[in-house]
Image (cartoon, rainbow, N blue to C red):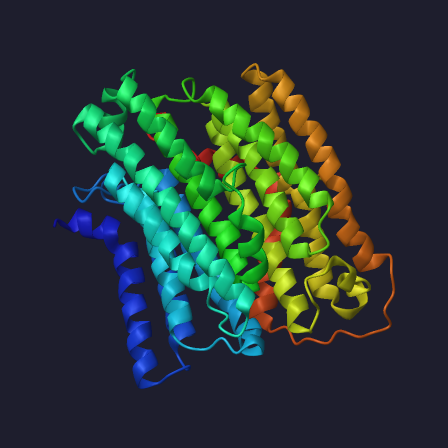
Amino acid sequence: MTTSDLWIAMPLLLLAAGAMVVLLLGAIVPNRYGSRVAIACCVGAALWTLQTPPVVTASLGLAATPVARLFTAFFCLLAASVLVISPGYNDKRAIHGEEYPATILFATFGMVALAGATSLLTMFLGLEAMTFGFYILVAMDLRRDASSEAGLKYLLLGAVAAGFLSFGLALLYFASGTLQSTAVLKAAAGDPLALVGWGFILIGIAFKLSLVPAHLWTPDVYQGSPAPVVAFLSAGSKAAAILFAVLLLDAAGAAAQLRTPLLVLSLLSMVLGNLAALQQKSIRRMLAYSAIAQMGYVALALACGGSGGYLAALYYALVYALMNFAAFGAVALFERSAVSDLIDDYKGGGEREPFAAALLTLAIFALAGIPPTAGFTGKFMIFAAALKGGEVTVAVIGILTAAVSAYYYLRVVVNLYMTTSGERCSSQITTSEKTILSVVALLLLLLGLMPTPLLDLLVLPGR
């Protein structure tokens, strides 16, 4: 291993070493320093990534491209933010032990490995390492049967999706004879066996992105998991899955071959996701079906490929992660004050929990695509790419479904502010929690008003 290899691999080493140290601390001084050490490791890995690398590609199958470094820093800071907002919620639910911060570090390790991977094998292992961490985190609330049920469903369906994905990648390897992502995808272009492999890969991606019909796990997992875990799952795993899809499709130039199935998945997800969300009484399940619809918009961007679709998908991956982190961060604050997940229980929330209500309102506006939030800019980029790519009909349907979604989104805001409760704020929000969530809220506004700095960083290799 050269010095350059070590430099590029350092974020992974910090996360892996941090996870092991956290577990060891749990045996020596339980429930004391685990979260602090994990936060320090995540921040350290993010800061390391912000430096200029000595080389772009290492011999370990990792790269430090601008996109890889951006997503690495994002995943690390996202994990640190989740660890900051978790203690207050976990104390209420009696979720203790160093396995929680350690598992978050392991899941982040998988995301970071995926972000910098140059090999199909490394990409797959990173994606599944992340998913394996979420299997554990989803079932972390041992006192709730719903959490165990959600973990089991996620595990069983995730294992099936991993089988499809691995078989598809194996077919690509068989068609090309190499695992290097760019080489294998170019060598397999036009091969009938590789086309079958792409079909299996698309099934795996559909599961990771919660695209219809591979979406059935999403509402149960979102409802049964601890709220900070859902914030991490809905933000981190979706961003990682979108990055995985973009890296594969862009390297292979396969958008044209997969255009029709991607458009079908997009249409089904946009329509069914939004229609199902209209019927939900639980805010968690409403946000879950909203996620299905939102990923339908991303699938539309992926179908448009190089005509601005990949750029729109990567931008929306980061923006959507911020929106969902803010939404479920607010849900976690509400649930700490004994509010259930029923939308009706949020009546008068603007009086009881003014900070959480304001944060949730901003996240809702962003998810609905209301300007000047980043959600509006992201949807505008996706539909612009669709129109540029000639998908006028699908774009119009997407715009109409986005308009329909405003009803169930704004219903939450109406409950927060159009009804009164006469109760005071009943939960204690720490300064660190307020700081993290306020920064996320500020980013949702700044990235909507000034998206150019972020877009300049989203440069794919070879472009």
x and y, in percent, of residue 114 in the image? 33, 45
Depth order, front residue of 442/231? 231
Depth order, front residue of 163/206? 163
Residue at the spot 59% in from the left edge and 28% down from the top edge: 267
Give above or below for 76 relative to 391: below
Q: Is residue 65 visible?
A: no
Give above or below for 111 relative to 166: below
Q: Is residue 210 visible?
A: yes
Quadrant of the drawing holding the C terminus: top left
Residue at the spot 52% in from the left edge and 78% down from the top edge: 94
What residue occupies the far bottom of the structure in this picture?
A: 29
**Tally of numbered discs:** 0
What residue occupies the far left of the structure in this picture?
A: 1
x and y, in percent, of residue 416 in the image? 79, 59
x and y, in percent, of residue 47 in the image? 37, 56
x and y, in percent, of residue 176 in the image? 20, 25
Give above or below for 297 relative to 196: below
Q: Determine which quarter of the picture holds residue 244.
A: top left
Q: Determine which quarter of the picture holds residue 399.
A: top right
Q: Determine which quarter of the picture holds residue 371.
A: top right
Residue at the spot 56% in from the left edge and 61% down from the top edge: 224
Depth order, front residue of 191/418? 191
Left or right of residue 435, residue 128 in this image: left
Depth order, front residue of 201/450? 201
